[in-house]
Image (cartoon, rainbow, N blue to C red):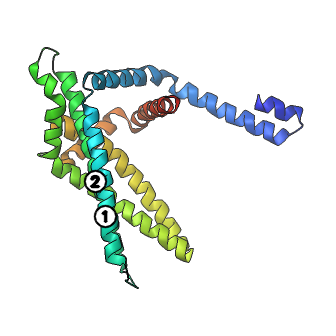
Amino acid sequence: VSAGIAFALNQVFTALFCVFILMLIWCSWRAIKARIPFAAANLSTACTALNAHKSVMCVVILMLILSLVWSFTVALAANGMFDGVGQVSGMVVFLVLVAYYWGGMICANVSHVTIAGTVGSWWFSPPEDASASYAVTSSFRRAMTSSFGSIAFGSLLVAILEAMKQMCREAQRQNNSMIACCATCIIGCIEGLVRYINRYAFVYVGLYGHDFCAAGSHVFGLFNHRGWIDTILNDDLIGNALNYGALMA
């Protein structure tokens, strides 16, 4: 439609650009069309599992509240540390940023591990099993005890990278440095990769109780066996479906 209107208005460049975008969308749809049923089955299974254990939302809300409390606490601590101080050490700022992001990441990943454990219990336990009714409680208990070290370690890696990225951004803003700009881009790419791997690693932590390093090793084994492209495309399809669903809701 846009291309037709542009042609009618003699805006050839705009019309050709619209046609090019349309061709890209068509090629993308052709590439992912065969993966849509599998992604739909995964999403349907996950929704069924979570619908069977609605109490997992209590854990998510609790972790969200704790994350807000942690952010407020770090902000108050930083205000007390920096108030009236003329020159603040960059290392101090870096450590405060690490602490800020670390607490928030831990809260988010506790929810992630709890949900993974709950879905795993729903999948492997028959409905008549009495322990199935305590899936959320047992998963949350494991996340806060035996798996908490793995959660903290994985969260610390992302927190350090996020703090480094913010420091580079601030250096770029103050000095307009090309080096800081490149460093921000590189660290951002590494952080995105670590975040993506962490999502799968914490699923292994929640399902099998692996430590973080063993879980990461299993993730790389999974990707090498199934293929990185297929895994990422299927995950991206599910993520887009969830985003569109949240937008329409």
Q: Residues within 10 Å of mark 1 (few under 14, many from 20)?
A: some
**231 to the left or right of 136:** right
In this view, the residue in front, 116 or 236, is: 116
- Position in image of residue 135 (x %, y %): 17, 29
User: Could one spot residue 221 in this view of the protein?
Assistant: no
Residue lying at 18% horizontally and 22% vertically, measured from the top left: 124
Asked whether, in this view, residue 111 is left or right of residue 84, the answer is left
Residue beneath disc 1: 74
Checking the image for residue 171, the label placed there is: none
Residue at screen point 38% across, 20% down: 41
Percent across and percent down for residue 219 are 28, 41
* Front residue of 91 and 85: 85
Instruction: In the rendered view, tell whether residue 69 sits above or below residue 197.
Output: below
Where is residue 136 shown, x and y percent of the image?
Answer: 19, 32
At mark 2, the secondary structure is: helix
Residue 34 in sight: yes
Dot 1 amino acid type: Val
Choose the circle earlier in sequence order: 2 or 1. Answer: 1
Q: Which image quadrant: the N terminus?
A: top right
Mark 2 vs mark 1, foreground winner is 1
Instruction: Label 1, secondary structure: give it.
Output: helix
Q: Specify few, some or many for label 2: CA neighbours under 10 Å numbering under 14, 14-19, or 20 or more.
A: many
Q: Position of residue 201 (x, y in %)?
A: 26, 43
Question: In the drawing, what numbered circle is on residue 155?
Answer: 2
Q: What's the amino acid at mark 2?
A: Ser
Residue 26, image quadrant:
top right
Give the residue at x 37% y 64%: 163
Comparing 29 with 111, the one in front is 111
Give the residue at x 75% y 39%: 17
